[in-house]
Image (cartoon, rainbow, N blue to C red):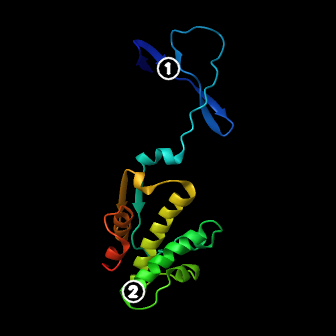
Amino acid sequence: MKEVSGRWQRRIWAARVGSRRERLQDISSHTTGTSAPEPTPPTPVTLPARIQRAAFAFRGYDIANLGRSAELLAHERFGPIVRTVLNEVSALASDVLGRHIDVAARVAAEQESSLETFPEDVALIVGMGLAQLRLLEDLFGIAYSKGQLAIGYSIGELTAMIAGGVYTLDQLLPVP
């Protein structure tokens, strides 16, 4: 119970209605009567409107670096965007390492990580993080820059700094 304007008021919650709960109108504890209050549906809040309270977490190096990357790359809507970002990262990684790197082909082939592939793994992890952010922006209207917090672990720190505009991809990708 909470006090509102000097009077105690309580909120009544209805049982499940369909697949969600609907809040019934606030009623004063001093109100009498036999009829039940009319349900007041909650105001829908879209995800882009809630982004100011969001925290983004970027992953680090792991034996399962591929995760579900191949599914994103093969997806009808997501694949072209993911491939574009991975090709950008591949071109930069190729310049830095002095040899041809194709992160998208590696993801498509589901080639797992090893110690020998560590430089490519950095490009893969950063590239997939950036690709997912671009998916949020391009397809769902969710701007990463509107989020409140970004954290990263290990290689994820690089992704968080690049996505946040602290550094550019070409400045940080050569570091590891």
The answer to whether residue 142 is seen in the rendering is yes
Please state which of the two labelled residues, at mark 1 or mark 2, is closer to the viewer: 2
Q: Which mark is residue 95?
A: 2
Q: Quadrant of residue 174?
A: bottom left
Residue 108 in the image: x percent, y percent? Answer: 58, 80
Residue 74 in the image: x percent, y percent? Answer: 62, 73
The answer to whether residue 66 is seen in the rendering is no
Residue 71 in the image: x percent, y percent? Answer: 60, 70
- Name the quarter where the N terminus is drawn: top left
Q: Nearer the viewer, residue 124 or 142?
A: 142
Identified at 42% across, 50% down, the residue is: 54
Mark 1 neighbour density, 10 Å: few (under 14) some (14–19) many (20 or more): some
Q: Which mark is residue 10?
A: 1
Q: Is residue 142 left or right of residue 61?
A: right
Q: Amino acid at mark 1?
A: Arg
Identified at 61% across, 34% down, the residue is: 21
Residue 114 in the image: x percent, y percent? Answer: 43, 84
Identified at 50% across, 63% down, the residue is: 134
Q: How many marks?
A: 2
Q: Is residue 133 above or below residue 98?
A: above
> Is label 1 in a helix, a strand or a loop?
strand
Q: Nearer the viewer, residue 130 or 38?
A: 130
Identified at 53% across, 20% down, the residue is: 26
Q: Determine the CA span between mark 1 and mark 2.
A: 65 Å
- Name the quarter where the C terminus is drawn: bottom left
Mark 2 neighbour density, 10 Å: few (under 14) some (14–19) many (20 or more): some
Q: Is residue 70 above or below residue 144?
A: below
> Is label 2 in a helix, a strand or a loop?
helix
Q: Amino acid at mark 2?
A: Asp
Furthest-bottom residue in this view: 99
